[in-house]
Structure formats: structure tokens, C-alpha cells
Amino acid sequence: MTRALFMQESLREKLKVEIQTKNLIIMSALTSADNKAKPSIDALLGPNGFIERKGGVGVLLVHGLTGTPTEMKQFGKVIARKGFTVACPELAGHCASIEALTTTKWHDWYQSIELAFDALKEECEHVFVAGLSMGALIALLLAAKRGHQVAGVILLSTTFFYDGWNVSKLKRTLLLPLVLYTPLKYFIQWEETAPYGIKDERVRAMVHAILENRDNQAADKIGYFKTPATVILESVRLIKAAKKSLKNVISPTLIVHSTEDDMASIKNAHYTQANITSETIETFFVDDTYHVLTLDKRKDDVAKRAAQFCKEQAQKLNLRSKIQASA
């Protein structure tokens, strides 16, 4: 093994130990004696996460793979102004470095959200979950596992298939499998190119400026646009798990997708709608926007529609509780 590879492996093992230690601390807090308090939602947000407390109903946001809470911030602010408490934690391994991200598995990303959900549930009567892209898959997994504890699910640009107009068929069907299932996965990174999932030229220019090293806090602000193949492989495993869980999703669901999505076609929305078992399924298909709905041209329309969905479903839950109490 060359010195460079040895150093890379040593760094990877060191970061893995640090993350495992952090997870053990969190789990220890959760399973400690009854007289010890569980971690609050504030303690689980991470340095770049955020919370806005505006009401007794909670909305937990899940950012995308290699993304950051920043991509959900404007979306969250609009919802919070409608009278909700909105929180968005960092997913495990995100907002630090590519090396830190590569030491995590999809189960770690999911656990970040399940812990945050339980913490938010401690202070909110009802909690909705809204996820973007791969974050939508984590939201689906949580809904499948926790059933009616999840008041509702908002799915933004759900990604089961990388079949958008900006993803070449050659890369999807030939190059990606060749890399993922061979030792090449330890050496290859995929670099995302323009339009970066964003149709708004002004926002796209801002992203491009950050990527051109004019801002050294890129990971905190916009996440990573170079994704290691090992991380993509974990996302494939997440996709498989989410597909298996769809039949167990019973919470009211709002599916939001762009008709011009550059990364994941609207086929993803139709696939989700056809396979979940929720009695209430609403759709909101928008144009003039690409994959990152929370940052693009229709971001406010999407956020207002999500807030409307949460308000309507929360009212139904409250009415049901009153009827049951008076019975």
C-alpha cells in the first residue's frame, strides 16, 4: 500500500471513530436512566441546523444528500410564519468535509432524523416531516416505521430514479454500475455540473461563485457538489430500503415535483403515489423550476402549499381528537 493510500485509510478510520463516538454519546443519552433528560431538539440540530418556534405543531425538515440545512431555510421560514415550529437538523456526516461524509452510512443519516423527530415530538402535539430529494426518502422511511405518529409527509423532488434530463443514460446505465460495484468506487467522485438543480439564473450564479472558491465556507452554505462513489452507493441502498417501505406509509402525503426536474423526472412522483397506502395523497406539480425546489423560482409557492397541507391536516387531527374526547 502506498504512503498516500495509507494516510487516506488512517484519516478515514480516525473520522469513523469520531463519528461512532458521537453516535454512542447520543444513544447513551437516549437509553440512560429515566431521571436523565432526553436530548432536546436544539442539541440535535448541529452547528448549521436551525429551529423557529412559532406554534404547537411541528414540521421537521430533511435536507438532501450532500446538502445542508441552508437549502431548507427559506422554505422553513415561510412555513414557520404560518404558525408552525420548524426544525432542520444536519444529517450525520454533512456540513464538515467529504472525508467525514464517507465514513457514514445511510442508517446514520436516517438516525439523525428519527432522533430529531422524537425530540420535536416532546414539545409539539403533532409533527409533520418534509424531505428534499434523498431527504424525501428518509421522510418516507420514518413515516413507514412510525405510522400515525407522523402527522403527515411532504415529499419534495423524491428521487428513486436518476432519470432527469440532465443525467445521461450512459452514465446511469453503464458507468455508474461499473464504478459502484468494483474497487473503482474508492477512487472516483462524481462532480455535479450546471445547472446544479436550479433554474433561477441568479441563484445558479451564486452557487457557481461559491464553487469557484470565492467563498471558503462552501460546505456550510451549499454542501458538496463532488460526491464520492461510496456515498452514491449508500444512496442506492437507501433507495432500496425506501422502496420496500412504501407499502407501510399510511400518513397523509403531499407529493411535490417539478415537471422540468433535471435530476429526477416526474416519474418518481407517480411511482411514489402508486405505491404508498395513505388514504390522503395530494399532488402539486410545478413548472419553471428544477430539482432543488426550496431554492428555485417557485420556492415560495411550494412552501405555501406545504404550509396549507400541514394546516389542513392538523385541523383534521384536532377535530378527531375533540370527537374522541367527547364520545
Image (tube, rainbow, N blue to C red):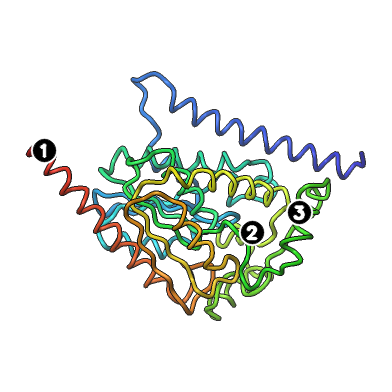
Q: Quadrant of the C terminus?
A: top left
Question: Could you tell which of marks 2 and 3 lies nearer the N-terminus?
Answer: 3
* 3 or 1: tag closer to the N-terminus: 3
Indicate which label's residue lies in the foreground, 2 or 3.
3
The residue at the far left in this view is 326
Q: Residue 191: image x %, image y %?
A: 72, 63
Q: Nearer the viewer, residue 326 or 267?
A: 267
Q: Which residue is mark 3?
A: 177
Image: 154 above or below 284: above
Q: What is the three-letter code of the residue carrying label 3?
A: Pro
x, y percentage for residue 250? 37, 46
* Outermost residue, front side: 274
Label 1: element kind: helix
Q: Which residue type does callout 1 highlight?
A: Ala
| Location of mark 1 (residue) | 325
C-alpha span from label 3 to label 1? 55 Å
Query: Label 3 near label 2: C-beta < 8 Å?
Result: no
Q: Which residue occupies 66% across, 62% down?
A: 225
Q: Mark 2 is on which residue type?
A: Tyr
Question: What is the x, y in percent for residue 78?
Answer: 34, 65
Is residue 107 placed above or below 226 in the rendered structure? above
Q: Is residue 39 left or right of residue 216?
A: left
Badge 2: how crowded within 10 Å, few (<14), some, or many (20+)?
many
Give the residue at x 70% y 47%.
Answer: 99
Secondary structure at numbered mark 3: helix
Above or below 16: residue 182: below
Q: Left or right of 95: which side holds 140?
A: left
Foreground of the two, 268 or 203: 268
Instruction: Give percent across and percent down for residue 120.
Output: 35, 42
Q: Earlier in the sequence, mark 1 or mark 2?
A: 2
Label annotation for residue 224: 2
